[in-house]
Amino acid sequence: MRSEEIRRVAGALDAEVTAVRTLAGGFSHETCLLTLAGAASGRESVVARLGGERPGVEAAVMARARAHVPVPAVLRVLPASDGCRPVMLLEYVPGTPLSHVLEVGRHGPREPRKPHDLHGLGVEVGRVVAAVGAVTFDRPGFFGGEGLAAGTEQPWSAQLPGFAAACMAAEPVQERLDAATRREWAALCAAHAPALARVDRHSRLAHADVNPKNILVSPVAGGGWRVDALLDWEFAYSGCPYGDAANMLRFGADYPAPFVAGFRAGFAAHQPAGAPLDRDWAYLGRVLDMFALSDLVTRPRRNAVVDRAAEEIRRWTAGGLPDAPDGAGSGR
């Protein structure tokens, strides 16, 4: 965070910024924890998310979601100005990243957590992720502005084949996946795309980046877990929330099995009112996740998530879609 940006935030909050610590999170953002002194509000710390193309839209999404799921309050949104990046100022929410809890659960702390604890954690996370879909819109699509009106889109079932083919032709992908895998992936996406006709008209809020790094949790006195915050809403859109469940399950082999089982149960059991659960919800979520996997491997900068996405594409082309109905996994 640049010195001029710190001064700008201090002025907006009418406080002194005494310390800045960079946090993880956000594909197109820098996220920092700011320690304050002398704030009229009495706040001792805030989180600043710098960058991104449309922080006002993300703030509007968070405000809508906050009625149904735990989301940090947006304090201010400052547009880009005089060489400073746009910044969204959020309340600081204490909690432990779910990624840390699952890593400890997988490798074992000095006092290993009992399997039912991790199952209960999964149920609670699944419940909260399902609740995101309680927010509804007039139609599916991507938000055009802070009013959260969704633009007109082709149905997802029509978009997926062309989108996947275009991604597989991108230069970074040619370095990450061999030609046969690229052809097979595009064909697999085309084969499964018609299944999305069942959810093409869903117009509920989808977070689109549900993963353990974006969820803060805390143990509850007497047993159990609480989700403290669902973070990073920059990719949210109006569509089918089954994709959020698939996003969480994408690297499910890395997580303790009791957590995964609990998450599936919690998501399925806590669908919002008026949203009957499709019997193939997990499969349809995986098909929606083909958009994200296709896009991830086009990123120019290599990182662990990009490499894992490439691994998943290889795995799915070799073994078929996870959670597919009998005989449908390979798409043939």
Image (cartoon, helix red, strand yellow):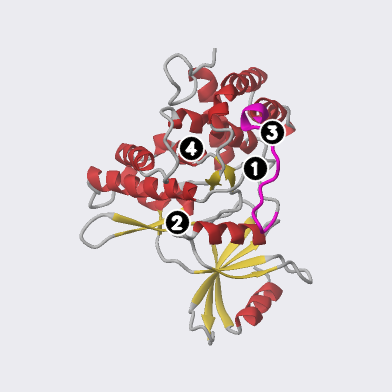
Amino acid at pointer 1: Gly
Q: Are marks 1 and 3 in contact (CB under 8 Å)?
A: no
Most extreme residue toward the left, as rendered?
Answer: 222
**First in sequence: mark 4 vs mark 3:** 3
> Which residue is label 3 attached to?
154
Amino acid at pointer 2: His
Image coordinates for residue 27, horizontal then vertical, percent: 61, 51
> Which residue is label 2 attached to?
68
What distance separates the C-alpha of mark 4 from that of mark 3? 19 Å
What residue is at 52 percent from the left and 18 percent from the top?
A: 318
> Which residue is label 1 attached to?
141
- The residues colored magenta run 145-159
Image coordinates for residue 101, horizontal then vertical, percent: 36, 51
Q: Nearer the viewer, mark 2 or mark 4?
A: 2
> Which residue is label 4 attached to?
242
What distance separates the C-alpha of mark 2 from that of mark 4? 17 Å
**First in sequence: mark 1 vs mark 3:** 1
